[in-house]
C-alpha cells in the first residue's frame, strides 16, 4: 500500500525544511511541496535524503492525494498575499473537516478573517506563531497556535512533540485561543523581542561609548550576565557576537553598519497598542530606535553639527557595569509587564480567553526571547492567575526595588554623558508614572476644557459627571460632547 502522509507542508525555505525534518525525526510522515517545484527535488535529494518519512509532491493534487484524512496542510510561506493565494488554490482539493495551518508571521486581523472565511466553508484553520529561527524549527521551536478550536485535537500531537520542552519536560506549545489569538501572541512575542534587543544594545552602547570597554571586555560582561537572572538566548548570542572575530582578527560587530532592518511585527505591536490605548512604551521606543538607526546619512551629517555633552565617565567602571545589569533587568520587567498588559486588553477587545501563565510557558523555551526570567513570570501567574500587572507580583516588585537605585543612576548618567537610552529611560518613566497616584492630567484636562470646552471630571464628585468652566468669562457655557477614544 502506498505510504500516506500525516501532514503536508508547503514552502521549502529553511524554516519549512527544518520543520519537516523535525516532524520526520518524531516519526511523522510529511509530504513536502513548494511552488517552485525544483526545490522539492533539491530537498528530497539533499537534507531529506534517505528518509522514508518525507514524501515529495509535484502538484497540489498529488500532495492532497498523499494525505491521510482529515488532511492537514501547513503553509510556511511569506505572510500576506501568498497565504491567501494558497488558501484559494487548496480549497478545490479539500473537503469539510480538513485543516489548513499558517505558520508564518501573519498579521492577526488576517488570521481572524481567514478563520471565519474557512469556517463558513467547513474547513478548519489555525494561524500559529512559530519562533526560534532555523535552529528552533529543526530541534524544537516555541509554537503558539490559535484559530478554530475544533482544529486543535487534530494537530496537538504533532505540534507538542516537535516543540521545545522546558526543563520539566513540558512542551512550549499549547492552544492559545480563538481565531487570531496565536498570531497575536506571536506578534507580542516579537514586540518583546524588539524591546529585549534594544535594551541589550543600549547597555552595549553605554559600556562602549560611556565606559570605553573593549569588545572582549563586553563579551565577558555578557557571558557573566548570562549566568544569573538575565540568563537568556539573546544575552548568550550577544556574548558570542562580541567575542567573534574574522580571519584577520577583526571583531565582525565593528564592521556591521549601524542601520537596523525590520519586517513589521514590532511595528504592528506598537500600532495595536495605540489602538487599544495600552502604554506599551518600551516596544514603541525599540521600533523608533530602529527607525532612527536607519537614518544613517542624516545622523552622520547631524553628528558634525549638533553638539552634545562634554562629560566623561568618572568613577568605578566595574560597579557601574553592575548598575547597568540591574537597570537592564528592571527595564526588562517593565517591558514584559507592558506586553502582558497589552495581551490582557487584546483578550478583552477580541474576545479571547488567554492563559497568561501558559503564554509564559510557551516562551520559556524554543523561542528567541527564551529565558530563565520567563520561568519566573510563569510562577507569578501560577501564584495568582488573575494578576493584573506583573509589576505588582511580590517577586518582581522585590527585584525592581533592589534594582531601582542602579536604574536611576544609569539613566541619569547616560543623560549626563549624552548617550541615548530610550528603552531604559522610557521603562523608568513608565514605572514612575504607573506608581503615581496623581499625574498632571488634571492640568491637561483643564487645558482641553479651556480651549475646546471638552469638560472634565472632578476629584470631589462621582466619576462620570462632566463639568465645564467658562475660563475666560467670554466663552459660552455650552460644552463639547464628552466621548473619548
Ligand atoms: C522568531 C522571530 C522571527 C522574526 C525575526 C525577524 O520568533 O523566530 O521573531 O519570527 O521574523 O526575528 O524579525 P525582524 O526582521 O522584524 O527583526
Image: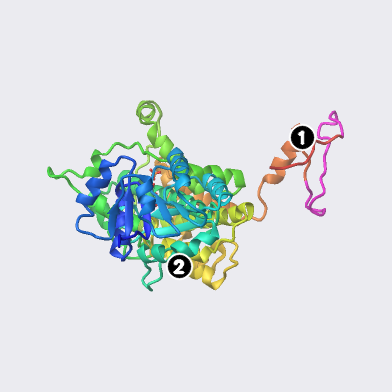
Residue 61 visible (yes or no): yes
Q: Tell me, yes or no, whether the highlighted magenta stretch contains residue 75.
A: no
- Which residue is found at the position 82% from the left and 43% from the top? 467
In which quadrant of the rendered image does the N terminus lie?
A: bottom left
Judging from the image, what secondary structure is the residue with disc 1 in?
helix
Residue 415, given in percent of the width and then of the height, sits at 44, 43
Residue 162's quadrant in the figure? bottom left
- Which residue is found at the position 60% from the left and 43% from the top? 275
Residue 280 visible (yes or no): no
Residue 133, given in percent of the width and then of the height, sits at 33, 52
Residue 376 tag number: 2
Q: How is the image coloured?
A: rainbow
In which quadrant of the rendered image does the C terminus lie?
A: top right
Q: Is mark 1 within 8 Å of ligand 1?
A: no
- Which residue is found at the position 77% from the left and 41% from the top? 482
- Mark 2 nearby-residue class (10 Å; few <14, some 14–19, many ≥20): some
Residue 349, given in percent of the width and then of the height, sits at 63, 52
Q: Tell me, yes or no, whether the highlighted magenta stretch contains residue 463.
A: yes
Identify the magenta region: 457-477
Residue 450 tag number: 1
- Classify residue 17 as left or right of residue 442: left
Amino acid at each position: 500500500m502506498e505510504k500516506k502522509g500525516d501532514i503536508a507542508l508547503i514552502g521549502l525555505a529553511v524554516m519549512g525544511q527544518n520543520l519537516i525534518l523535525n516532524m520526520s525525526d518524531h516519526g511523522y510522515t510529511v509530504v513536502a511541496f513548494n511552488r517552485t517545484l525544483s526545490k522539492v527535488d533539491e530537498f528530497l535529494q539533499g537534507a531529506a535524503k534517505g528518509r522514508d518519512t518525507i514524501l515529495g509532491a509535484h502538484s497540489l493534487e498529488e500532495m492532497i492525494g498523499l494525505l491521510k484524512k482529515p488532511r492537514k496542510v501547513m503553509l510556511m510561506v511569506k505572510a500576506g498575499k501568498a497565504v491567501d493565494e494558497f488558501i484559494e488554490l487548496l480549497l478545490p482539493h479539500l473537503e469539510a473537516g480538513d485543516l489548513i495551518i499558517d505558520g508564518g508571521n501573519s498579521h492577526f486581523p488576517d488570521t481572524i478573517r481567514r478563520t471565519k472565511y474557512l469556517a463558513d466553508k467547513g474547513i478548519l484553520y489555525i494561524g500559529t506563531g512559530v519562533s526560534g529561527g532555523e535552529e528552533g524549527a529543526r530541534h524544537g521551536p516555541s509554537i503558539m497556535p490559535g484559530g478554530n478550536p475544533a482544529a486543535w485535537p487534530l494537530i496537538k500531537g504533532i505540534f507538542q512533540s516537535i516543540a521545545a520542552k522546558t526543563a520539566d519536560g513540558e512542551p512550549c506549545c499549547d492552544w492559545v485561543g480563538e481565531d487570531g489569538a496565536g498570531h497575536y501572541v506571536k506578534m507580542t512575542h516579537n514586540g518583546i523581542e524588539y524591546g529585549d534587543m534594544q535594551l541589550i544594545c543600549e547597555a552595549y552602547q553605554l559600556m562602549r561609548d560611556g565606559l570605553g570597554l573593549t569588545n572582549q571586555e563586553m563579551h565577558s560582561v555578557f557571558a557573566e550576565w548570562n549566568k544569573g537572572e538575565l540568563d537568556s538566548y539573546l544575552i548568550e548570542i550577544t556574548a558570542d557576537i562580541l567575542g567573534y572575530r574574522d580571519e584577520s582578527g577583526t571583531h565582525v560587530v565593528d564592521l556591521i553598519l549601524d542601520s537596523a532592518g525590520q519586517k513589521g511585527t514590532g511595528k504592528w505591536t506598537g500600532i495595536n497598542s495605540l489602538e487599544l490605548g495600552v502604554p506599551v512604551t518600551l516596544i514603541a521606543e525599540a521600533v523608533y530606535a530602529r527607525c532612527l538607526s536607519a537614518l544613517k546619512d542624516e545622523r552622520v551629517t547631524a553628528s558634525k553639527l549638533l553638539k552634545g555633552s562634554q562629560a566623561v565617565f568618572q568613577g568605578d567602571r566595574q560597579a557601574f557595569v553592575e548598575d547597568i545589569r540591574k537597570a537592564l533587568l528592571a527595564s526588562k520587567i517593565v517591558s514584559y509587564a507592558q506586553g502582558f498588559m497589552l495581551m490582557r486588553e487584546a483578550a478583552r477587545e477580541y474576545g479571547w480567553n488567554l492563559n497568561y501563565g501558559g503564554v509564559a510557558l510557551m516562551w520559556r523555551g524554543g523561542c528567541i526571547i527564551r529565558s530563565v526570567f520567563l520561568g519566573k513570570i510563569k510562577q507569578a501567574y501560577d501564584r495568582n492567575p488573575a494578576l493584573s500587572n506583573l509589576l505588582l507580583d511580590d517577586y518582581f516588585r522585590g527585584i525592581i526595588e533592589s534594582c531601582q537605585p542602579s536604574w536611576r543612576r544609569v539613566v541619569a548618567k547616560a543623560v549626563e554623558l549624552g548617550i541615548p537610552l530610550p528603552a531604559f529611560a522610557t521603562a523608568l518613566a513608565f514605572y514612575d508614572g504607573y506608581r503615581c497616584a496623581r499625574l498632571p492630567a488634571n492640568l491637561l484636562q483643564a487645558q482641553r476644557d479651556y480651549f475646546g470646552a471638552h469638560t472634565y471630571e472632578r476629584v470631589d464628585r462621582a466619576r462620570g459627571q462632566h463639568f465645564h468652566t467658562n475660563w475666560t468669562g467670554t466663552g459660552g457655557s455650552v460644552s463639547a460632547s464628552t466621548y473619548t477614544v
